[in-house]
């Protein structure tokens, strides 16, 4: 069994981005990511701090807008509009979740596609579905693909199962795997018999937010397992969606939690931001 070490790979990517940023600065461009946080959700605050720290590590300017949870939707849209027209800002990210009185889809669509470094805008989703590299790809699925590539895992012809059908992970993940030549099944909460799919899979990607959802009796020997889930137990321990101790015994490759997909997600956010800044040269 080989661990897919996202922490080590993300560190390498950050070093490469640091060099790219030095080149951009020599051309008068400073990569800049604007992050908008609405309210005081503890998990969101932690994520935003980690993103700001990661930006600092590789020479990206970080702007954090921490807004009151009672801000109106129009006020938030006005801020995004200002950032859309600010040439010094190359990436805009709105930290989810948002308060109930704010329409998430409207907010995400209001970010101009050329600064949508999360890859959620319909235009970028369209580029992905057409197999074009013109736009930005969603960070978590892109991080998974980079991780698999780094370990020279050939996806062509593989039977892949994705557990979870969210617009953030599951659906774009399925498209990326299809584009790479895999045969893809997407399982979700309505799937009748999950193990019917997972027992045949060469590759399983789990992104459901459910502790121990994938057990060893549900996988075959030599399976590749990517655990996107992040769950905090009452003890405070962070675990994924996979019963790591048992499933790892049958796996050829598996991601740890933490230290697998999480660091790669942030690395891809940084990479998309630098890509956006580099686009200014053209």
Image (cartoon, rainbow, N blue to C red):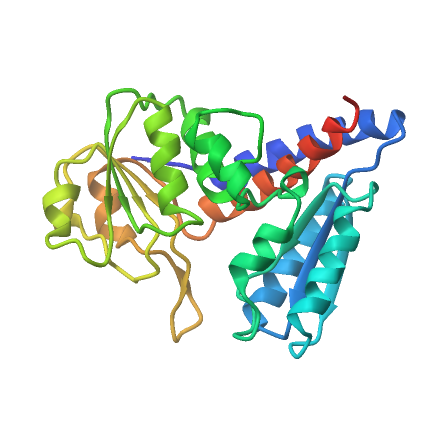
Left or right placement of residue 61 versus residue 190 in this view: right
Q: Is residue 74 above or below residue 164?
A: below
Q: Would you identify the image quadrant in which residue 203 lies?
A: top left
Q: Residue at x 88, y 25 (%)?
A: 26
Q: Residue at x 58, y 32 (%)?
A: 135
Q: Position of residue 150 (x, y in %)?
A: 46, 26
Q: How many marks?
A: 0
Nearer-the-camera pick, 47 or 93 = 93
Q: Residue at x 32, y 24 (%)?
A: 155
| Quadrant containing the N terminus in the rendered view | top left
Q: Is residue 25 above or below residue 44?
A: above
Q: Position of residue 227 (x, y in %)?
A: 35, 47
Nearer-the-camera pick, 127 or 254 = 127
Q: Is residue 102 above or below residue 262?
A: below
Left or right placement of residue 279 versus residue 128 in this view: right
Nearer-the-camera pick, 5 or 135 = 135
Q: Position of residue 46 (x, y in %)?
A: 61, 64
Q: Residue at x 58, y 65 (%)?
A: 44
| Quadrant containing the C terminus in the rendered view | top right
Q: Position of residue 231 (x, y in %)?
A: 39, 63
Left or right placement of residue 87 versus residue 270 in this view: right
- Can you name the residue that lies furthest to the bottom here? 70
Left or right placement of residue 140 versus residue 173 in this view: right
């Amino acid at each position: 069994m080989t661990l897919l070490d996202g922490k080590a790979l993300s560190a390498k990517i950050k070093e490469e981005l640091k060099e790219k940023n030095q080149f951009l600065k020599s051309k008068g461009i400073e990569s800049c990511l604007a992050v908008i946080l609405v309210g005081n959700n503890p998990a969101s605050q932690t994520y935003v701090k980690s993103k700001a720290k990661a930006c600092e590590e590789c020479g990206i300017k970080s702007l954090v807008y921490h807004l009151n949870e009672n801000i109106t939707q129009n006020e938030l849209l006005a801020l995004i509009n200002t950032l859309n027209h600010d040439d010094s800002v190359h990436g805009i990210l709105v930290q989810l979740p948002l308060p109930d009185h704010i329409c998430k889809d409207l907010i995400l669509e209001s970010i101009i596609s050329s600064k949508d470094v999360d890859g959620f805008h319909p235009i970028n989703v369209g580029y992905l579905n057409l197999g074009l590299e013109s736009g930005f790809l969603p960070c978590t699925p892109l991080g998974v693909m980079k991780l698999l590539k780094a370990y020279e895992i050939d996806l062509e012809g593989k039977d892949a199962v994705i557990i979870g059908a969210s617009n953030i992970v599951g659906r774009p993940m399925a498209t990326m795997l299809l584009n790479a030549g895999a045969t893809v099944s997407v399982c979700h909460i309505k799937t009748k018999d999950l193990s019917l799919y997972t027992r045949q899979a060469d590759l399983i990607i789990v992104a459901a937010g459910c502790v121990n959802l994938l057990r060893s009796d549900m996988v075959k020997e030599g399976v590749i397992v990517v655990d996107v889930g992040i769950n905090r137990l009452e003890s405070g321990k962070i675990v994924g969606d996979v019963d790591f101790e048992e499933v790892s015994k049958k796996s050829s490759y598996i991601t740890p939690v933490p230290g697998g997909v999480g660091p790669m997600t942030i690395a891809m956010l940084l990479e998309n931001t630098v890509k956006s800044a580099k686009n200014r040269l053209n």
